[in-house]
Amino acid sequence: MIMLGVVLHGICYDFFFVTGFMYTDNKAPKEVRNQAQSLLVFFTQGVGMFFGYKIAGAKFAAVQESSDALAATIQTPTFGFWESFGKMFLTEKPTATAGIVQDAMANWKTFWMFPSLMALVVAVIFAFAFWDKVKQEKASTE
């Protein structure tokens, strides 16, 4: 599941950020290229993340309640830096009630399915809306 999350992040980063920067760099006149790149950053990492936070927060508010219930069942003492560092390499699993873990695992699929479907929709829109027609026409006439 972690690897699928990494793959989803890579696809989203490539489609939305890198390709957007390349497209903007190609289309914007040299005099305003820096401003166009800054505007793209503002929309993707400012406005876009704000709406993503609002949508995900509204959809997954109940997940936090499950997380709080799970954290409440795990009694962990406070450790110093070196104790905490040493415990990172232990393989002990905390114990929790089966119902809480089952609820958390049921939400896990929904939690990742929603952004995956959003990424798929945007990728399809991107594939149909942002192909460079001018360069293809030039290539076919040569």
Image (tube, rainbow, N blue to C red):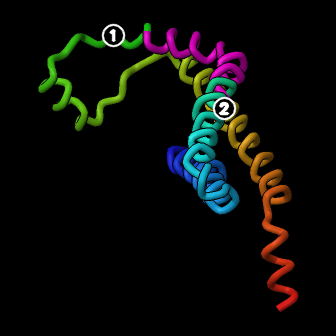
**Helix, strand or loop status at disc 1:** loop
Q: Which residue is mark 1?
A: 75
Please rate how many residues cluster around mark 2, counting C-alpha atoms within 10 Å: few if below 14, some from 14 to 19, many from 20.
few
Where is 31 relative to 109, above or below? below
Query: Image point 67% across, 58% down: which residue?
Result: 23
**Helix, strand or loop status at disc 2:** helix
Q: Which residue is mark 2?
A: 48
Please rate how many residues cluster around mark 1, counting C-alpha atoms within 10 Å: few if below 14, some from 14 to 19, many from 20.
few
Kind of residue indicated by mark 2? Gly
Q: Which residues are magenta?
A: 52-71
The spot of residue 8 in percent (x, y) is 60, 48
Q: Is residue 100 left or right of residue 91?
A: right
The spot of residue 98 in percent (x, y) is 54, 20
Residue at the limit of the structure toward the front, as seen here: 31
Where is 21 relative to 76, above or below? below
Kind of residue indicated by mark 1? Gln
Q: Is residue 35 visible?
A: yes
The spot of residue 10 in percent (x, y) is 56, 52
